[in-house]
Image: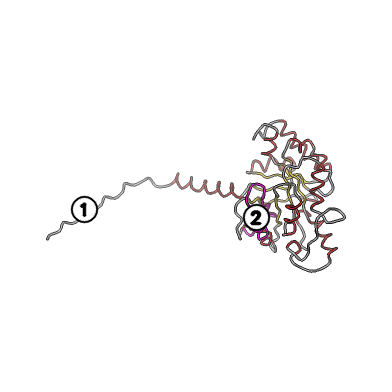
Amino acid sequence: MRDNPVKAKITAGGSSFGAMIFEFFTPGIAQICKAAGAEFILYDMEHTAISTETLRQQFALCRGLGIVPLVRVPTTEYDFIARMLDVGALGIMVPMVDTAEQAAFIAACCKYPPVGRRGAAFGVGHDDFTGGSVLDKMKAGNERTLVICQIETAKGAENCDAIAAVPGVDVLWLGHFDLTNFMRSPAQFDNPRYLKAVDDVVAACDRHGKTPAFMAADQKWMADYLAKGFRLMAYGVDIGIFQNALAQGIDFMRANAAPSRPAPKAKPKARSRK
């Protein structure tokens, strides 16, 4: 059974940084992210049309690279959570967690009995198709799986302390855009109510030994939220990173291109001497 160095690192009080993938589910993306220094890849199912089969291949591509595959499932359903774990995800993020009861259900879906309710399947993707002691695999699976609850509604923010207190929950991930939407202040990231919710999430994590997490779109977001105490962070999403870099290059070429030259005149055709 592979371990989960990201979970080990943040549980010990450290920080971990990685990438969020919405679009580029290519054979090379895991190696590209690893070469860039990412410690994890968070694959998104909530806002994409990605299939289980494609994610199964992506998780397999992470094997041997030392990069941790995480996945955001689309909803709080056992079927999504257990299937993603069985095909090789080492961590699960669930969006729009509003209550401690939801968080407890999510944690239970990620853990084998008697701790939780995860179904048994061995010699498959999550244990790299190997044999060995089932009891050891269950113990290792329970210990290595990273359980991430996303706080992105007003109700979730109000209940963040109770959610952070749930055994088995490791991370509270702040969903900043949706949180402002549910607070009826879309994209107002300087709104006092939003900023209080951010502080509340960090404080709840500190009280209960959990890790606050965030997706930062640029270096200013990174600096601000690292200073607030966030320790698990993804840099942007693949679409924005590629698009912004491409736009900068194209803008530079257009700004520095040589002035247009008049098209050369066509030479007159020679007259026939017949």
Instruction: Give the x, y percent position of residue 170.
Output: 79, 48
Check disc 1 and report the residue beneath it: 268
Quarter of the image containing the N terminus? bottom right
Q: Secondary structure at mark 1?
A: loop
Neighbor class of circle 2 (other Cα within 10 Å; few <14, some 14-19, many 20+) is few
Q: With 242 as the anchor, is 183 left or right in this view?
A: right
The local secondary structure at tag 2 comes to loop
In this view of the protein, which residue sits in the foreground, 110 or 206? 110
For residue 222, side relative to residue 250 (left or right): right
Q: Position of residue 6 (x, y in %)?
A: 75, 54
| Percent x, y of residue 110 | 79, 53
Q: Which label's residue is closer to the chain start, 2 or 1?
A: 2
> Which region shows up in magenta?
30-57
Residue 108 is inside the magenta segment: no
Residue receiving disc 2: 51
Q: What's the amino acid at mark 2?
A: Ser
166 to the left or right of 191: right
Is residue 82 positioned above or below 98 on the image?
Answer: below
Q: Quadrant of residue 174?
A: top right
Q: Quadrant of the C terminus?
A: bottom left
Q: Residue furthest bottom?
A: 131
Give the residue drawn at x 72%, y 44%.
95
Residue type highlighted by circle 1: Pro
Residue 37 lies within the magenta run? yes
